[in-house]
Amino acid sequence: MELKKKSEQHILDLYQSVKNNNNMSFSTYILSLDWLYLIDVAKINEDGRVQLCS
């Protein structure tokens, strides 16, 4: 998981990392972030950075 490598990343930088490794569409990426948010694994702050929840 890319967030384990760096626990806070800009949303677009994280997408580029995921896309390069998995060939994932942006819509699938956003849906994945939604699910991570729903299960309290990740959140997006006001600066557009995805943070891994502890």
Image: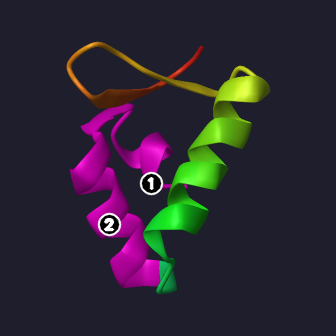
Residue with the mark numbered 1: 2
Q: Position of residue 47 (x, y in %)?
A: 20, 19
Q: Position of residue 33 (x, y in %)?
A: 58, 43
Q: Position of residue 21 (x, y in %)?
A: 43, 81
Magenta region, residue range: 1-21
Q: Which mark is residue 17?
A: 2
| Kind of residue indicated by mark 1 | Glu
**Element under label 2?**
helix
What secondary structure prevails in the magenta region? helix
Residue at position x 55%, y 55% in the image: 1
Residue 16 forms part of the magenta stretch: yes
- Mark 2–mark 1 Cα distance, whole angstroms, equals 7 Å
Q: Along the horizontal axis of the image, is 50 left or right of 13?
A: right
Looking at the image, residue 39 lies above or below residue 25: above
Count of picture labels: 2
Residue 7 forms part of the magenta stretch: yes
Q: Are marks 2 and 1 in contact (CB under 8 Å)?
A: yes
Give whichever of discs 2 and 1 has the lower sequence position.
Answer: 1
